[in-house]
Amino acid sequence: MPSPDKFMFRKHASIGAAAAEEDSTFLTECFVDNGDLEPLLDCSDRRRIILGRTGAGKSALLSKVVAQTHSIIINPETLSFNYLTNSTILQFFLEAGVKLDLFFKLLWRHVFTVELLRNRYDLKTKTETTSFIDNIKSLLFRDPHKERAVKYLLQWGDHFWEDTEYRIREITHKIEKDLEASVKGKFPSIEFGAGTATKLTDEQKTDVVQRGKSVINAIQMRELTDVLTFLNENVFADEKQQFYICIDRLDENWVDDGFRYLLIRSLIETIRDFLQVRNVKIVAALRTDLIERVFRFTRDPGFQEEKYRSLYLSLRWPREQLLTLLDKRVNYLVRQTYTKKPVGYSEILPKKIEINNDAASYLIDRTLMRPRDLIEFFNNVVELAAGKPTLTREMIFTGESLYSKNRMRSLQDEWISDYPCLIDFAALLKQQPNTFRLKSITRDFVEEFCLTYSINDPRSRPSDLLSTQARGVVDAVISWSNFLCSAMHIFYITGIVGLKTEAFESYQWAHEGPSTIVADTIGLETSVKIHPMFFRVLGIRPGAVQNH
């Protein structure tokens, strides 16, 4: 049995779970604040949308906000937004061309307002709600703006004590009835349902759109704007009583994508609207690729994305802070399980992995500079160390093989909405030098690759730009070089490769900041560097560089 100052790794030891929701113990003890927590806790700071790629620490940061504030947690899955998807009436008007943005903003604003009032005044029962309503009636005739706000609250106030799902159904049902009534008088035989709007004549569709717009435009947004003023001046005027609403898991399948993008766009706009309530802060976590997709699919004339950027808090992890995170987690694992003596990563990792490269740097070089990657890589290595006091080079190399395969699968999951065939086309890079010129991949190789893919590809699965262009190469409607440049741009966006489009530039990586390389700037002279994270899964030999 080891002495108190010695330790050996047990079977299935780990430095925590990759997902924050499964990592509460390590998260509590080993949280590393890289400067992002303070602006989120400050109600006067505009930044309130946490942006980052999968595994960058969005959920971990949000959990710290919840732990340190009076927070209301809203999980989209628990709301009744699927009721919208199943509404044949809403589907009909959406397909006809009626914009439902105002309605979706009404839903979010209504949900937030009611949740805030419920928590501020602890409204849990119908009796408590009735008492609250009686109290605010005294405000009715003091101020015309507050009068409109209070009348709005009175309209829905009887059900404050009900859960959020009930209220979403209630307000949606009212809009459905108004929309249905707007066209039934003119078209009594009209049918509502998916696809039925496409059967209308142009004249009928124009009429339906006008009638639908009139209903949506009549939504009481003026009253809701007055409600925000009421909240700011009468309910949350005390700076010592600040409330936070925290929203996570927006990237999960909580509603059909067609509605999800519209709802997230409306959520962002509602978060911006709530800036005027000084002592309330709505904080939401969003994946970078998801917000880009939201704006791409909901963009309308006059849209200006820059007016939202002041709301963003983009997560970045410098190398030093990742090392701090690793040190804290290793120390906690060893201290809790094996010995009270402080032990950091430097005491259990080998001194060198490669010439001029220490073990910790080797691990971090094989991440996209985000905590989840580092935690998973280290856990894969520790799994091989049962009964041993330290980790060896051989353990790291063996663990890297599984880690590299898993990271490629995770990358596919992260980008499946845009590039469902990403893994298939990443095979273009197999056994290439780790750094090469794009022109070194020959026309014959590309055309044979595209032909093989097109023959073996089941047409029943979702296609993407890569698979469409590959078939275009086979059909001679897209040149092999255009396909290759397009593929490299996608590999750059997703993080598989870094690119250098000019000889005097350094390599650019998408995970280091906003994507700055556009597809049109990539040519056969472009230099490509494969990310070390994917060396093993792609069969890349470290240090293999093409001679130019």
Image (cartoon, rainbow, N blue to C red):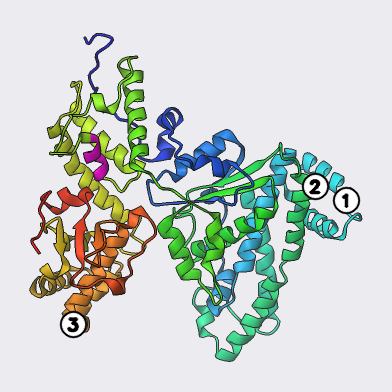
Q: Residues within 10 Å of mark 3 (few under 14, many from 20)?
A: few
Of marks 2 and 1, which one's residue comes earlier in the chain?
1
* Residue at x 27%, y 34% (from the top left corner): 379
Considering the whole magenta stretch, tell me its main secondary structure. Answer: helix
What residue span does the magenta drawing correspond to? 360-366
Mark 2 and mark 1 residues within 8 Å of each other at the beta carbon = yes
Percent coordinates x, y for residue 219 in the rendering? 71, 68
Quadrant housing the C terminus: bottom left
Give the residue number, with chain letter if any, for mark 2. Answer: 234
Q: Nearer the viewer, residue 104 or 365?
A: 365
- Label 3 sits on what residue type? Asp
| Residue 475 disc label | 3
**Mark pair 1, 3: CA separation:** 72 Å
| Horizontal relation, residue 520 to residue 427: left or right | right
Tag 1 residue: 139
Label 1, secondary structure: give it.
helix
The residue located at (73%, 49%) in the rendering is 159
Given the image, on which type of amino acid does mark 2 rest? Asn
Residue 274 percent coordinates (x, y): 66, 54
Three-letter amino acid code at disc 1? Leu
Badge nearest the viewer, 2 or 1: 2
In this view, 334 is above or below 81: above
Residue 88 horizontal/vertical position (percent): 56, 69
User: Which of the pair 6/13 is nearer the observer?
Assistant: 6
Q: Quarter of the image holding residue 382?
A: top left
